[in-house]
C-alpha cells in the first residue's frame, strides 16, 4: 500500500523496493524509479493522489543497482525529466558496471535481468558529488554514503530533518537491517557511512529528531 507521508511526499511501495515522489510548485520529482512493475504502480499512485496531471520534472538516482534504475531511462524519455545521479556510479547507468567478490552474484542477476526487463542505458543530465545542493522541494543535500555501491548516496532535507537513506538500510515494515553482503560492493565502507548519518542525527535540534526513509 502506498503511503502519503506529507501532503507533498508520496512513498510508492513495491514488493522489492520503495521509491518516492516529491511535489513542489514546479511539479513532481522522483527519487529512483522502482523495479519491474514500478511504472504502472507509479501511474496508479499518482492517479489516486490526483497528481497524474502534474509534470514529472526530475528524477534523482540514489545509486546504480538495477532495482533502482531499471525505469530511469524510459521515464526520462517519456517525460523529458532531467536526471541527477551520483558521479561515482556512472558505469552502472550505461550498463558497464563490474562486480567483484561476493557481489558477483549481484552482477549475474543484473546481467540476466537487464535484457529480460528491457533496461535502457541513460546518461544523467547532472552528475552529483557529496555536499551538492538540489534546489527542489524543501532543498536536498547530497550525502555520499558508500558501501552498498561506491557512489551510493542519500538525500538530506535539513529543513525537515529528513534523510532519504536509500539502501544504507534495508527495511520491510518495522524490520530494518543492513543489506546482505552480496549487494554491498564496498562492505568495509558501510560502517563509515552509518557514522555519517549519525553525525546528521546529532547535528540538529534535539526537539526535531532525524527521520529516515530507506528503499
Image (tube, helix red, strand yellow):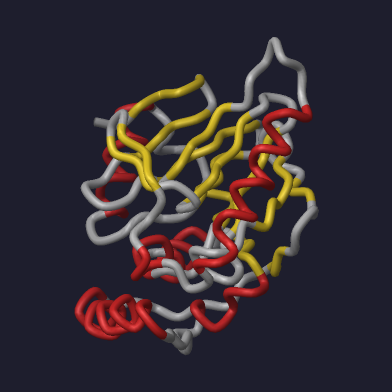
141 left or right of 151?
right
36 left or right of 179?
left
Q: Residue 120: where, in percent of width, then height?
A: 39, 78
Residue that sits furthest to the top in the current view: 207
Residue at the image position 27 percent from the left and 84 percent from the top: 108
Q: Residue 181: where, in percent of width, then height?
A: 37, 65
200 left or right of 172?
right
Residue 213 vs 126, above or below: the answer is above
User: Is any part of residue 35 visible from this angle?
Assistant: yes
Residue at the image position 34 percent from the left and 70 percent from the top: 182
Task: Name the residue nearer the viewer: 12 or 168.
Answer: 168
Q: Residue 92: where, in percent of width, then height?
A: 49, 79
Residue 25, located in which quarter of the rendered image? top right
30 left or right of 173?
right
Residue 128 vs 156, above or below: the answer is below
Residue at the image position 43 percent from the left and 84 percent from the top: 99
Residue 57 vs 150, above or below: the answer is above
Q: Quadrant of the N terminus?
A: top left
Residue 118, located in which quarter of the rendered image? bottom left
Q: Residue 184: where, in percent of width, then height?
A: 44, 67
Residue at the image position 47 percent from the left and 54 percent from the top: 32
Amino acid at each position: 500500500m502506498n503511503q502519503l507521508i506529507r501532503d507533498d511526499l508520496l512513498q510508492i511501495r513495491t514488493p522489492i523496493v520503495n521509491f518516492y515522489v516529491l511535489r513542489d510548485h514546479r511539479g513532481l520529482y522522483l527519487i529512483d524509479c522502482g523495479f519491474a512493475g514500478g511504472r504502472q504502480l507509479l501511474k496508479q499512485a499518482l492517479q489516486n493522489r490526483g497528481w497524474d496531471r502534474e509534470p514529472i520534472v526530475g528524477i534523482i538516482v540514489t545509486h546504480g543497482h538495477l532495482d533502482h534504475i531499471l525505469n530511469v531511462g524510459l521515464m526520462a524519455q517519456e517525460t523529458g525529466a532531467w536526471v541527477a545521479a551520483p558521479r561515482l556510479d556512472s558505469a552502472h547507468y550505461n550498463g558497464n558496471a563490474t562486480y567483484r567478490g561476493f557481489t558477483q552474484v549481484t552482477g549475474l542477476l543484473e546481467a540476466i535481468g537487464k535484457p529480460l526487463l528491457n533496461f535502457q542505458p541513460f546518461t544523467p543530465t547532472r552528475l552529483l558529488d557529496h555536499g551538492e545542493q538540489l534546489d527542489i522541494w524543501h532543498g536536498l543535500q547530497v550525502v555520499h554514503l558508500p558501501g552498498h555501491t561506491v557512489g551510493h548516496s542519500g538525500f538530506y532535507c535539513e529543513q525537515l530533518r529528513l534523510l532519504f537513506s536509500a539502501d544504507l538500510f534495508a527495511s520491510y515494515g518495522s524490520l530494518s537491517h543492513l543489506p546482505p553482503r552480496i549487494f554491498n560492493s564496498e562492505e568495509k565502507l558501510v560502517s563509515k557511512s552509518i557514522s555519517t548519518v549519525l553525525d546528521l542525527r546529532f547535528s540538529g535540534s534535539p526537539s526535531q529528531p532525524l527521520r529516515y526513509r530507506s528503499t
